[in-house]
Image (cartoon, rainbow, N blue to C red):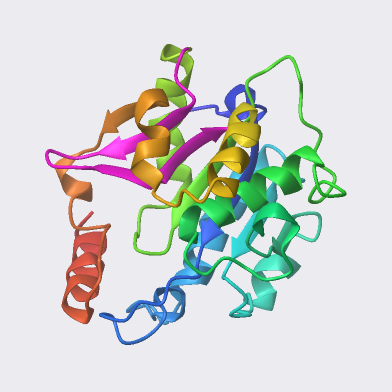
Amino acid sequence: MNNSNHVASLAGIVILAGGASKRMGTPKAALTLPTGERLLDYHVRHALELNVADTHLPIMIADNGRGFDIDADLVRSRPCSAVSHISDYTANGSDEQIDTAGALAAIESAMQTLTNVNGSAAGSATIDKKKLSWLMVISCDSLIPATDLWHELQRASAQAADKKVICLTDDSHLYPLLGLYQLSIEPDLKAYIDSGQRRVMPFIKPIVQSVPFAKSWQHLTNFNTPEDFAQACTALNNL
């Protein structure tokens, strides 16, 4: 499938890698797959595959200051790609990060980076104002590749013109941190965080379109313990 026309509306990708991962016992971004690849590098590698259509598509790592490095060979193989770390958004001009803002602070920061709210845009990507521009959000509690995630979500984004967030769902709940967020919601998200709100679901509920995913993906995401991660690795091998 040729995604080049659709990728033009993808403004950037943010990989959420800042969770405490207490039940896992180690940061999820640093988990090692059976192949020996770290989970964060796995997501960066697949995100870079989307750069085949646009070599300047920004890929942002939001790790809440943990400083996870990226395999140098990944970036070396695509020298024009823009892979960078971003800090979480700080509300109301505070110099301190909001530890409790979690994913929303990372998403807001990524949106600001892309829309030049707080300085230069990541890389040299140009956002086409005439098209709907999306930020793709990928959490580090998933093994769903960025390429496959985009393939599933971009079709729904074309069919749900009135929705601003497109995310995966299964039979029981939404996965708001595996989704697309329209850049146009940035001012509303900023105001929501500045007002002291932190919960993802109340913010997205009026504007979300869910996309059911295949049963084969059921065990690839939402892993919180070493046992969950082992099950996810087995499910990935069985695909």
- On the image, the x and y values in percent for residue 191 come to 60, 39
Q: Is residue 174 left or right of residue 135?
A: left
Q: Residue furthest bottom?
A: 25
- On the image, the x and y values in percent for residue 14 come to 58, 53
Residue 98 drawn above or below residue 137:
below
Q: How many numbered dots are placed on residues in this image?
A: 0
Q: Is residue 36 left or right of residue 22?
A: right
Instruction: Residue at 54% x, 27% y: name it.
Output: 2
Instruction: Residue at 50% x, 68% y: name it.
Output: 17
Residue range in magenta is: 162-182
Foreground residue among 207 and 36: 207
Foreground residue among 34 and 196: 196
Foreground residue among 42 and 106: 106
Foreground residue among 91 and 132: 91
| Quadrant in which residue 78 is drawn | bottom right
Quadrant showing the C terminus = bottom left
Instruction: Residue at 46% x, 74% y: name it.
Output: 29
Residue 167 on the magenta span: yes
Residue 185 drawn above or below residue 191:
above
Instruction: Residue at 55% x, 28% y: name it.
Output: 3
- On the image, the x and y values in percent for residue 203 come to 42, 37
Q: Is residue 43 left or right of residue 124?
A: left
Q: Main SS type for the magenta part?
A: strand
